[in-house]
Image: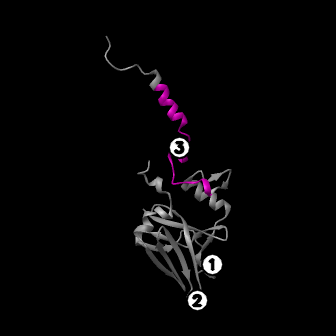
Amino acid sequence: HASTPMYRALEPVAVCELLKLNPLLESQLGPYRYRIERKGDQSIYSVTDGKETLSYPIAYAFGLGAAGQTYIYEHQGNLYESRMSYYKKFDGLGVTIGAPPGLPKTLQEAAGRLMTKRDQAGCFGCHTVNAVQNDVIKLDGLIPGVQCENCHGSAKAHIEGFKDKLVSMPKLGRQT
């Protein structure tokens, strides 16, 4: 399972291969300049308008980067989706799919989009295990990436089926 792309549907930044391989990513959107810079086990997401700069440690990297990767950061106890994501097609940063169209009006808006509780439950529910319980996000218990049971349901019946077959199978070996 660890060799499948689903295993890396969400990566903690400390082990994120794409961010390790790209220690500096930069882009510009109108008057805003974006930068993701690797510092030890962290990657810092920054946006500036030339006068002020906002910087946040990236908390989570969604997607393994085969097509792209989007970043989540925390600000004042809230989760935000970065306005810029990595896209393999042009090996750099571009506007995150689903970001509001046009140029942002403020530096905070340029940095990213506040994730609603529904956004959080949807994103973390599909990209992790154990992060959403009763439609409430619980980040302290999440397991990064997607495991088989996310899509295929409980493995209990599958395992029990093997046990039943093993118990009912004839013993192999020489018969005398």
Residue 64 x %, y %: 45, 61
Q: Secondary structure at mark 2?
A: loop
Residue tagged by mark 1?
108
What residue is at 47 percent from the left and 73 percent from the top? 39
| Image disc number at residue 152 | 3
Q: Secondary structure at mark 3?
A: helix
Q: How many marks?
A: 3
Q: Amino acid at mark 1?
A: Gln
Q: Would you place residue 85 above or below residue 1 in this image? A: below
Quick one: which residue is furthest to the top in this view? 176
Q: Amino acid at mark 3?
A: His
Quick one: which residue is furthest to the front in this view? 40
Residue tagged by mark 2?
51
> Label 2 near label 1: C-beta < 8 Å?
no
What residue is at 53 percent from the left and 44 percent from the top? 149
Q: Would you place residue 103 above or below residue 42 in this image? A: below
As for residue 157 lying within the magenta part, the answer is: yes
Horizontally, is 176 left or right of 142 in the view? left
User: 77 or 110, which is in the foreground?
Assistant: 77
For disc 1, the neighbor class at 10 Å (few under 14, some 14 to 19, many from 20) is some
Q: Amino acid at mark 2?
A: Lys
| Image disc number at residue 86 | none
Boundaries of the magenta span: 139-165
Residue 29 x %, y %: 52, 81
For disc 3, the neighbor class at 10 Å (few under 14, some 14 to 19, many from 20) is few
Picture quadrant of residue 137: bottom right
Residue 92 x %, y %: 43, 73
The alpha-carbon separation of the residues under discs 3 and 2 comes to 50 Å
What residue is at 57 percent from the left and 86 percent from the top? 49
Which is more N-terminal, label 2 or label 1? 2
Q: Secondary structure at mark 1?
A: helix
Frontmost of labels 1 and 2 is 2
